Image (cartoon, helix red, strand yellow):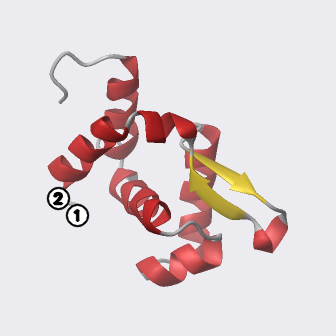
Amino acid sequence: MFPNSDAISRSLWWIFIGTKGGITRLKIVKSLMENPGNIHSISQSLHLNYRTVEHHIKFLEKNNLIVAQGDKYGRVYFISPLLISNQDKLDFIFKKAGIR
């Protein structure tokens, strides 16, 4: 876990490492950092089922880790300001999870 961890660090750790779908969510976030996209493009680039990505996108959006622009199928997802401002914590989690 994080040295001198705060509430955000603990929350990010739980969301990405401490839950069953955390690694999938982490891969989705990494993908969005490289290239914002809709659910279809994310599922294609990560070779994941559309419904799986949709489920994790809803979870990430509910927890303010991603934001969306647009409607329905054309809805594009981006990394939230919360994650951007905690990039160092996210990088630590990527490293611990072995995601480059």
Examine the image and state in which quarter residue 41 appears.
bottom right
In this picture, is 74 found above or below 7? below
> Disc number at residue 100?
1
Quadrant of image for the C terminus: bottom left
74 lies left or right of 82: right
Q: Is residue 36 in sight in this rendering? A: yes
Which residue does the image show at 25% across and 19% down from the upper left? 5
| Residue closest to the eye, 70 or 12 | 70
Residue 47 position within the rendered picture, expressed as x and y whole percent measured from the top left: 43, 82
Q: Residue 25 vs residue 89: left or right?
A: right
Q: Is residue 42 left or right of residue 17?
A: right
Q: Which mark is residue 55?
A: none
Task: Name the kind of residue labelled 2 in the image.
Answer: Gly
Residue 18 seen in the figure: no
Q: Of the numbered discs in the image, which one, if any, rests on residue 98?
A: 2
Residue 11 vs 34, above or below: the answer is above
Q: Position of residue 87 (x, y in %)?
A: 36, 41
Looking at the picture, tell me which residue is in the foreground, 65 or 85: 85
Q: Secondary structure at mark 1?
A: loop
Disc 2 to disc 1, how far (Cα)?
A: 6 Å
Q: Nearer the viewer, residue 12 or 85?
A: 85
Spot occupied by residue 17 in the image (x, y as percentages of width and height): 29, 44
Is the Cβ of the residue at disc 2 closer than 8 Å to that at disc 1?
A: yes
